[in-house]
Amino acid sequence: MIRTNLDHVWRPSPNFGERLSDVDILLLHYTGMKSGSAAVNWLCAEESGVSCHYLVDIDGSITQMVSEDKRAWHAGKSYWQGNEDINSASVGIEIQNEGSSLTDIVENMPDFPDVQIAAVIALSKDIIARHKIPAERVLAHSDVAPGRKVDPGPKFPWAKLAQAGVGVWHQNISIGNDLSVKDIQRCLWTHGYDCHVSGDMDEETVRFLKSFQLRYGLEKIDGVADHATQHLLQNIGKKND
Ligand SMILES: [Zn+2]
């Protein structure tokens, strides 16, 4: 049984299996549900078929549901840098927030309270330290399931987390050189998405661009590779090389 050293409530979920690989990803979610307790009940109900290692409620309280050495069921169909079994490679944290729909992405979404984010940072640092997870492998559910998932969403304070040593953020965006569609697709693939280098700005490429814009806080989440998006793609790509 591997549990966090931080104060937490233990509410075991029956929904887990054996890991097929070592842990090297921390995957962050929002619940998209009305309350933290409703989310814990769902994640612990056998009928749901889903679970997560942790849930952080809006008051900063932490519930653990699956031992960290077990494979919890939170990522679903997913992909990152060649890996299609993100559940085996990750520890998952559900963060209580009602979330937003894809069509009305910012307006409907509540803010994350400071006390909640402080708890997410503390828990993340604890997990990262014990599993030696690299900063660039602290991922959003939207990173590994682009188009299908948007959580933890546009209001999630990634910059604040990066400042505290959790995950990566970017420097100020300046104008970069124009990239060809193939260049853009190569950058998306290098970054982690399952992007084919076709040279056509196809539906799949637009979906990955949207997910990238969402994750890195760009003003427009429209899948159009404008200068800001291209520059950021080049920068993030370099950082991961
Ligand atoms: Zn999620």
Image: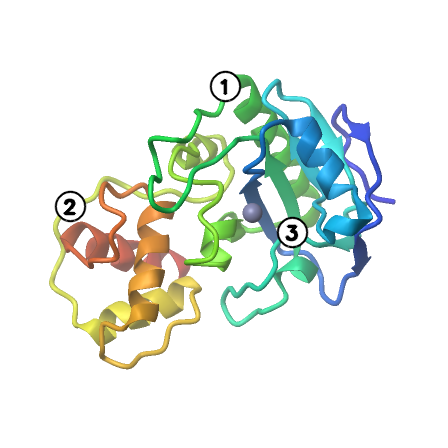
In the rendered structure, which disc, 2 or 3, sits on the residue that comes first in sequence? 3
Ligand 1 under 8 Å from disc 3 Cβ: yes
Q: Can see residue 135?
A: yes
Where does residue 67 sit, x and y in percent of width and height?
Answer: 81, 45
Q: Position of residue 185 (x, y in %)?
A: 29, 71
* In this view, 58 is above or below 210: above
Kind of residue at badge 2 = Ser
Q: Which one is nearer the viewer's eye here, 28 or 31?
A: 31
Visible residue check, residue 128? no
Q: Callout 1 environment at 10 Å: few (<14), some (14 to 19), or many (20+)?
A: few
The quadrant the N terminus occupies is top right
Q: Residue at x 56, y 23 (%)?
A: 116
Question: Label 1 belongs to which residue?
Answer: 114
Residue 223: quarter of image: bottom left
Mark 3 neighbour class, 10 Å CA radius: few under 14, some 14 to 19, many 20 or more: many
Closer to the camera, 132 or 123? 123
Where, by quadrant of the figure, is residue 216 drawn? top left
Given the image, on which type of amino acid does mark 3 rest? His
Decide which of tag 2 and tag 1 comes sooner along the chain: 1
Distance Cα–Cα, label 1 vs label 3: 24 Å
* Residue found farthest to the right: 1
Q: Please indicate whether residue 97 sits to the left or right of residue 216 in the image.
A: right
Local secondary structure at mark 1? helix
Looking at the picture, does residue 123 appear above or below residue 68?
Answer: above
Residue occupying image coordinates x 56% and y 18%: 115
Residue 177 is left or right of residue 36, and the answer is left
Q: Regarding mark 3 in the picture, which secondary structure is present there?
A: loop
Q: Position of residue 131 (x, y in %)?
A: 69, 49
Which label lies toward us, 1 or 3? 3
Q: Which residue is mark 2?
A: 174
Q: 218 above or below 236?
A: above
